[in-house]
């Protein structure tokens, strides 16, 4: 069924997208707080030291503070990607699997047996280019942790479930309201 501008279905689709934006933004801000409060600012590329109250003495998030960023990264990127694609279970599954593979590959790339090989392929010209200049440090200083892989899997699963819940909320409401008002939209004015 075609949705007309301003129809109940289109309004609910926009509400669902707003909900996903809010969810992604809140989880992202939570992730930023982990880096601000629990991480040494010298090891965080995008956060200047003067913004971080981190003293190195305490870890507000405890042991979870080590795995939460990988959970949050995959969760937020799945939600953001879903915002710009077709709202279908198939699209959600492809997006989730894609980010699961990307984040897992980046984690595996930090393994002590893999990172030296990858470092040998990084060209020298990346030095001095913002963001790209951090690639060698990521592989050189990063630490592979199997708990991060579990965290990535959990984040991907949580994001997929969040997308399914947001879709079912919108579809049920959209179906009922559109069916009730279908005649008013059958003939565009």
Image (cartoon, rainbow, N blue to C red):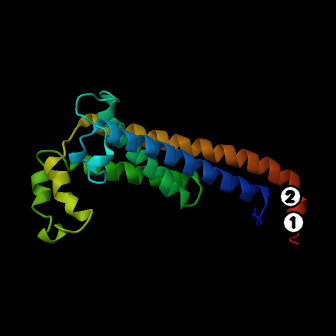
In the image, residue 94 sits, relative to residue 162, either above or below, namely below
User: Residue 130, how many percent across, how many down?
Assistant: 26, 65
Kindly indicate the quadrant of the structure image that contains residue 34.
top left
Foreground pick, 97 / 4: 4
Foreground pick, 24 / 40: 40
In the image, residue 121 sits, relative to residue 98, either above or below, namely below
Q: Which mark is residue 74?
A: none
Q: Is residue 48 left or right of residue 176?
A: left
One can see residue 153 in this view: yes
Q: Dot 2 corresponds to which residue?
A: 182
One can see residue 152 in this view: no
Q: Is residue 95 left or right of residue 106?
A: right
CB under 8 Å between callouts 2 and 1? yes
* Position of the N terminus by quadrant: bottom right
User: Residue 25, how many percent across, how many down?
Assistant: 50, 48
Kindly indicate the quadrant of the structure image that contains residue 166.
top right
Q: Considering the numbered disc 1 on the image, is that residue within a helix, a strand or a loop?
A: helix
Q: Which mark is residue 186?
A: 1
Q: CA distance from mark 2 to mark 1?
A: 6 Å
Kindly identify the residue that appears in the image at 54 percent across and 45 percent down. 23
User: Residue 174, how many percent across, how many down?
Assistant: 75, 51
Kindly identify the residue that appears in the image at 78 percent across and 55 percent down. 8
Q: Is residue 136 left or right of residue 158?
A: left
In the image, residue 187 sits, relative to residue 145, either above or below, namely below
Kindly identify the residue that appears in the image at 28 percent across and 37 percent down. 54
Say few, some or many: other residues with alpha carbon within 10 Å of mark 2 (under 14 / 14 to 19 / 20 or more): some
Q: Considering the numbered disc 2 on the image, is that residue within a helix, a strand or a loop?
A: helix
């Amino acid at each position: 069924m075609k949705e007309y501008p301003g129809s109940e279905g289109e309004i609910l689709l926009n509400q669902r997208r707003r909900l996903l934006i809010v969810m992604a933004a809140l989880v992202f801000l939570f992730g930023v707080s982990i880096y601000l409060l629990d991480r040494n600012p010298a090891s965080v590329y995008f956060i200047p030291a003067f913004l971080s109250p981190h003293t190195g003495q305490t870890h507000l998030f405890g042991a979870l503070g080590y795995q939460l960023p990988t959970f949050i990264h995959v969760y937020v990127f799945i939600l953001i990607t879903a915002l710009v694609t077709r709202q279908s279970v198939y699209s959600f599954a492809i997006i989730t699997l894609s980010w699961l593979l990307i984040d897992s590959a980046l984690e595996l790339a930090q393994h002590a047996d893999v990172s030296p090989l990858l470092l040998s392929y990084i060209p020298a010209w990346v030095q001095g280019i913002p963001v790209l200049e951090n690639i060698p440090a990521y592989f050189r200083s990063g630490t592979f942790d199997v708990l991060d892989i579990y965290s990535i899997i959990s984040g991907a699963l949580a994001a997929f479930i969040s997308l399914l819940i947001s879709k079912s909320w919108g579809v049920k409401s959209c179906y009922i309201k559109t069916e009730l008002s279908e005649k008013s939209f059958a003939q565009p004015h």
